[in-house]
Image (cartoon, rainbow, N blue to C red):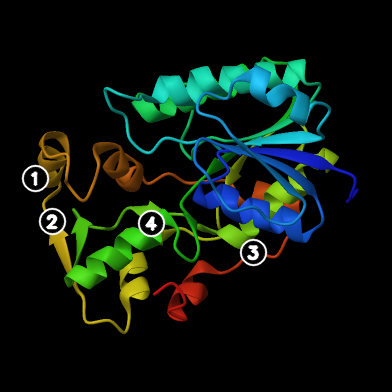
Amino acid sequence: MDNDLQVVITGASGYVAKNVRKYLSENNIKLISISRKNFKTFKNETKIITKNYDERQISTKIKNSSALVHLVGIGKDSTKINYNSINVDLTQKIVNLCKNCRIKKIIFTSGLGVSKSTTFSYFISKYHAERKIIESGLDYTIFRPSYIIGKNDPFTKYLKKQIHKGDILIPGSGNYTIQPIYIGNVSEIIFNSISDKKFKNKILDLVGSESISYKEYVKLFSKGTSAKIKKINLEKLYHDAISNPNCDFALDDLNLLIGDFKGNYRKLKRISKINFVNIRELLKTGCFL
């Protein structure tokens, strides 16, 4: 890959962005990383802190960059900040920024299960964000990720917190499946998508090689600990998620978890041509605890 590349990363303080930035830095890519929050920089990295991604503050610093990786996310809808304002309106602002700054390539993380027929508000906002990018005329790669796991990812931190409490709660049967992918693989794939023409104007499921039931995932993750695994009534949990802001599960988290979404791993493997980490084997090592 051309080491003269300059890449812009939005949402730079987030978990995925931090790992992608580290990977790109280690591969001698020049970075311009943007976030609302302060963060530590890596080699070859310029930091921009902005509350509202004001083009006047950003444009001169990112003009003519090779690509922009848009990783700004929102974990929960609220009266103060909502999915549309972040997933749709901000994405449109980023698209405009790319056009005005002559950045021809945009890479975006959407969500596994997003489609035009969805009725789930989080997915609806991501779908509209995808359309903003597709209709922009920019060269794009849209990734629809499953759970992205690694050391101290949000999902891992949640499970570790439950282990510390002594009980891991499984909503309902736990037989619904997830298709997690290792953060190292994600970073490599995003790195490759910046300039590899095989990724041009593609929508790809960002998933691991195997689906695994939530019940099995929890068992493998907690193996060797004294934590007890307990099933909790799904109806009761949904009621708690709706009425209790301090519930361990947010409503949208539950919808994502039990949605049983499946991704097209073979297509991702064919285009990326990387060696994927086996999640089951990784969990057995206990490296996340």
Q: CA distance from mark 4 to mark 3?
A: 20 Å
Q: Which one is in front in this view, the residue at disc 4 or the one at disc 3?
A: 4
Nearer-N-terminus badge (4/3): 4
Q: Which residue is mark 3?
A: 276
Q: Quadrant of the rendered structure where residue 278 is?
A: bottom right
Q: Amino acid at mark 3?
A: Phe
Q: CA distance from mark 2 to mark 4?
A: 18 Å
Q: Identify the secondary structure beneath mark 3.
A: loop
The residue shown at (77%, 52%) is: 44
Q: Identify the secondary structure beneath mark 4.
A: helix
Indicate which disc residue 254 carries: none
Q: CA distance from mark 1 to mark 3?
A: 38 Å
Q: Which residue is mark 4?
A: 155
Location of the C terminus (image quadrant):
bottom left
The residue shown at (51%, 76%) is: 281
Q: CA distance from mark 3 to mark 2?
A: 33 Å
Nearer-N-terminus badge (1/4): 4
Q: Amino acid at mark 4?
A: Phe
Q: Which residue is mark 1?
A: 236
The residue shown at (27%, 64%) is: 161
Left-right relation of 150 to 173? right
- Which class describes the residues within 10 Å of circle 2: few (<14), some (14-19), or many (20+)? some
Q: Identify which residue, 144 or 66, lies in the foreground.
A: 66
Residue 66, placed above or below residue 80: below
